[in-house]
Image (tube, grey):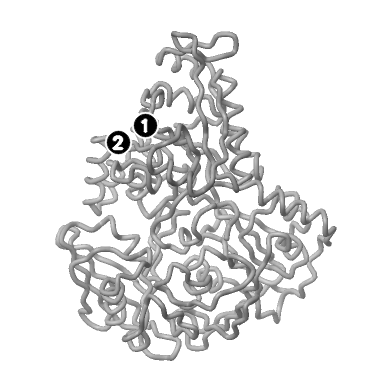
């Protein structure tokens, strides 16, 4: 799993939604110590170039052993289940503002005011046993999940799913369903003949029959080995014939990257420019593109956070540029105050807010806002009319040492404005309870982007998500609710952008949460043997191997042997 994102890996396997996300420094520190202890060589030892047909990748297995569970309906499905073996209908490239990425589904068309979607399936698509993948398989999969109450994250309510013909899927709804598009695209069909009569809750599917470009060649508790299919429907010649996916411990990751034994990974390398890229600038590369951001969430059920001037003042007191250097200088960027990242979500940001940036602390403006709320700075302390200093606590998961350190930096910045801020490490289960109940002052967490701003704003601002998803602050606004409802009922990009502009204005003016910095899809790769990796100039996919699904397969299908 990506150490920069303390969340479920499924966030980036294109399952539609995720929970809290944070950037990491503790793992980076442990990797740095491991690197120093090994004194490993900076020169890759892997033989490179022409003739190479295998690649070793770190898929981010949890623990020290691999469970043989390739059930795509299980929340505990083994890494390598999705993409390698089971494919989604389509995806959206959030690195390009939600650009459509066809896969099993080549296009979709809405009709009946958003109550009907018709999806054309690629006529070439087949299963690994050579049989055709049809719309009937997709219909079976959807009904199988619904009838058996299975928990894949893409599951959604619908009226009826039918196969108009072998390559045309039609889904109807009782009301406009534009907002379900990410979930619809994330459907991963299974062959009806293989799953009919199976218990989807208990079956571990040890020998999968999927539509993906790879078959499981060998399983062991320490490594999965995938072999490219000769009969893959989308691309006949797959240069990366074999993908080896061993268990990689934190301590071993950097040494194996530097030796060249590990060619593709998604861990956080401490000061990656210095520790990895500089050791072999020709072949060592790292890219951490944005897929979401970190935010300071205020508890809107408690004073003084009910006062917009306090929220504005606290946001103004944060030095976001300093936060960028905590983990990996040069790998992240500050967030636009709308909460959207200007680099990847810029097409959705209204012209009025294109320059809504605050990279440095603005203490004078902060104190002016505090004054409007009845606070003045005296003797280095920000006090109210009775002389009581403004004080509060940021709660954080106690085992996330990196996050605790990050929060302490934020606290030290706020203290420059005279606020007394403490950071309280809390057991994860207790923090979750406190967050849901609204029993806290402030916390720092994350949110991710989708094909459009709809789900981002729904996660963060919709009153129905108070305490869950990313409305951690229990923010409630009738205006926001109405706008989100309106956005969810339209499939017109121009209308979505217009409504988004109003919600962006609420983020800037009402500060329901303070945007801080981006979070990135951390990825390191070695180009000694393989070229064609995604880059900032060609962001065709999220680059981490644990991203799974369409992103990871887009990369493997795009790689070509390096010359030499």
Quarter location, residue 510: top left
Q: Quadrant of the C terminus?
A: bottom right
Residue 143 x %, y %:
26, 75
Q: Please indicate, yes or no, whether residue 354 appears anywhere in the rendered image.
A: no
Residue placed under numbered mark 2 in the picture: 476
Say whether marks 2 and 1 touch (CB < 8 Å).
yes
Question: Badge 1 local density, few (<14 within 10 Å), some, or many (20+)?
Answer: many
Residue 275 x %, y %:
75, 52
Identity of the residue furthest to the bottom in this view: 130
Residue 474 x %, y %:
35, 38
Residues under labels 2 and 1: Cα distance?
8 Å
Residue 252 x %, y %:
73, 63
Secondary structure beneath dot 1 equals: loop
Question: In the shown orientation, is residue 113 left or right of residue 430?
Answer: left
Q: Answer with mark 2 or mark 1, whichever residue precedes in sequence.
A: 1
Quarter location, residue 259: bottom right
Residue shown at the point (63%, 70%) measured from the top left: 57
Secondary structure beneath dot 2 equals: loop
Residue shown at the point (61%, 80%) measured from the top left: 225
Q: Quadrant of the N terminus?
A: bottom right
Q: Which mark is residue 120?
A: none
416 relative to 95, above or below: above
Q: Please indicate, yes or no, whether residue 158 appears anywhere in the rendered image.
A: yes
Q: Nearer the viewer, residue 239 or 401?
A: 401
Residue placed under numbered mark 1 in the picture: 300
């Amino acid at each position: 799993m990506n150490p920069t994102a303390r969340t479920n890996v499924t966030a980036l396997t294109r399952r539609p939604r995720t929970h809290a996300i944070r950037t990491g420094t503790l793992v980076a520190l442990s990797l740095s110590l491991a690197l120093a202890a090994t004194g490993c060589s900076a020169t890759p030892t892997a033989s490179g170039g022409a003739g190479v047909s295998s690649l070793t990748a770190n898929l981010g297995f949890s623990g020290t052993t691999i469970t043989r569970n390739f059930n795509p309906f299980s929340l505990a499905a083994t890494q390598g289940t999705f993409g390698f073996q089971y494919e989604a209908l389509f995806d959206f490239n959030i690195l390009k503002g939600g650009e459509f990425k066809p896969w099993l589904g080549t296009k979709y068309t809405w009709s009946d005011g958003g109550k009907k979607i018709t999806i054309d399936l690629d006529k070439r698509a087949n299963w690994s046993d050579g049989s055709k993948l049809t719309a009937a398989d997709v219909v079976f999969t959807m009904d199988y999940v619904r009838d058996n109450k299975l928990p894949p994250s893409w599951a959604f309510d619908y009226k009826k799913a039918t196969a108009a013909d072998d390559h045309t899927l039609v889904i109807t709804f009782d009301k406009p369903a534009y907002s379900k598009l990410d979930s619809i695209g994330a459907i991963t069909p299974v062959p009806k003949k293989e799953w009919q009569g199976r218990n989807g809750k208990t079956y571990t599917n040890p020998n999968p029959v999927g539509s993906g470009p790879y078959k499981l060649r060998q399983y062991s508790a320490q490594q999965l080995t995938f072999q490219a299919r000769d009969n893959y429907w989308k691309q006949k010649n797959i240069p990366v014939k074999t993908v080896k996916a061993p268990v990689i411990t934190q301590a071993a990751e950097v040494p194996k990257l530097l030796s060249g034994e590990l060619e593709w990974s998604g861990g956080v390398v401490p000061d990656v420019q210095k520790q990895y890229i500089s050791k072999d600038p020709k072949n060592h590369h790292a890219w951490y593109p944005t897929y979401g951001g970190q935010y300071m969430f205020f508890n809107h059920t408690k004073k003084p956070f009910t006062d917009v001037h306090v929220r504005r003042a606290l946001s103004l007191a944060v030095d976001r540029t300093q936060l960028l250097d905590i983990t990996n200088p040069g790998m992240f960027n500050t967030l636009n105050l709308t909460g959207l990242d200007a680099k990847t979500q810029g097409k959705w940001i209204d012209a009025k807010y294109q320059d809504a940036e605050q990279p440095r602390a603005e203490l004078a403006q902060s104190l002016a806002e505090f004054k409007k709320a009845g606070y003045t700075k005296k003797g280095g302390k920000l006090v109210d009319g009775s002389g009581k200093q403004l004080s509060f606590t940021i709660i954080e998961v106690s085992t996330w040492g990196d996050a605790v350190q990050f929060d302490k930096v934020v606290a030290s910045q706020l203290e420059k404005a005279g606020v007394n801020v403490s950071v309280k490490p809390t057991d994860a289960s207790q923090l979750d309870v406190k967050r849901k109940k609204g029993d806290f002052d402030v916390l720092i967490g994350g949110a991710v982007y989708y094909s459009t701003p709809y789900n981002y704003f729904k996660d963060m601002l919709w009153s129905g998500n108070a305490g869950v998803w990313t409305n951690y602050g229990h923010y409630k606004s009738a205006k926001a609710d109405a706008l989100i409802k309106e956005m969810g009922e339209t499939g017109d990009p121009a209308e979505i952008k217009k409504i988004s502009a109003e919600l962006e204005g609420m983020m800037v003016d009402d500060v329901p949460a303070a945007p801080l910095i981006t979070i990135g899809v951390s990825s390191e790769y070695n180009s000694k043997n393989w070229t064609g990796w995604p880059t900032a100039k060609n962001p065709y996919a999220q680059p981490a191997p644990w991203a799974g699904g369409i992103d990871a397969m887009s990369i493997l299908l795009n790689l070509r042997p390096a010359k030499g």
